[in-house]
Amino acid sequence: MGFTISKKFADAATSKSGKGGAYLNPSKLADGGSVKFHIVSDEPLEFWEVWGESADGQLKPFRFVEDPTPEDIEAELGDFSRRMNRDGNGVEPAKPAMAFTVFNLETETIQLCQFSQKLLIAELTSIVQDEDTSDLTQFDLKLSRQGLMLDTKYSLRPVPTKAGTHKKGLAALAAAEADGYDITRLLSGGNPFSAE
């Protein structure tokens, strides 16, 4: 038999869904890519995020449950300094962000999804405030990306869920929690998927 690559592997390796790993990150979606997921969190984890940079250029997020003061930020950064804004004429501000647990419909795995993009936060807020789509047990979400760098445009749309998706997602969440998953570890810089 000749050299063959399984369809499952080929699909995963060439996917534009950005589905890799335990995190579903909108900025990791390829240009033209999309991913469907089902929210299994009861509520989002809301916080403010500041990026720090070490002397050797390593980036690290710092998260705060309240909008932090400059003094709060400096106290938390330690050996890191605040990342400069794109123009290089000041530091980046603390940005509101949210994280929630999702069931990725393509991989059928639990992932942590974080939105720090204003447009995505606004679209999700609009979806959950609309009486036609507010019951997220009845809807999946399709996240899409067009463009690159500063020309990136995201969209988030509700799509009807298939029968059994919510139940399957909750079962996967229960299994992840039994293995130690805790989204709140994100706030202290820990790994939500491991207590270690």
Image: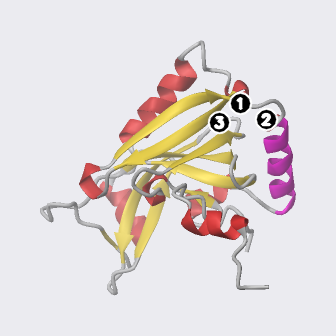
Q: Is residue 92 magenta?
A: no
Measuring from the top left, give residue 167's x and y in whole percent.
85, 36
Looking at the image, which is closer to me, 122 or 3? 3
For residue 66, say whether it is visible: no
Q: Which mark is first along the chain, 1 or 2? A: 1
Crowd band around label 2 with a 10 angstrom C-alpha radius: few (<14), some (14–19), many (20+): many
Q: Is residue 97 above or below residue 192?
A: above
- Give the quadrant of residue 119: top left
What residue sits 68% from the left and 22% below the top?
Answer: 135
Secondary structure beneath disc 3?
Answer: loop
Q: Quadrant of the C terminus?
A: bottom right
Q: Which residue is mark 2?
A: 166
Picture coordinates of residue 175, whole percent (x, y): 86, 55
Q: Nearer the viewer, residue 191 or 67?
A: 191
Q: Is residue 110 left or right of residue 190?
A: right
Label 2 – label 1 distance at C-alpha: 8 Å
| Residue 178 is inside the magenta segment | yes
CB-based contact (under 8 Å), mark 2 and mark 1 = yes
Q: Residue 77 appears at what percent x and percent y?
A: 40, 70
Callout 2, which amino acid? His
- Horizontally, residue 142 falls left or right of residue 83, namely right
Q: Which residue is at a point 71% across and 30% down the rendered structure image?
A: 161
Q: Which mark is residue 161?
A: 1
Q: Residues within 10 Å of mark 3 (few under 14, many from 20)?
A: few
Whether residue 43 is situated above or below residue 60 in the rendered picture: above
Magenta stretch bounds: 167-179
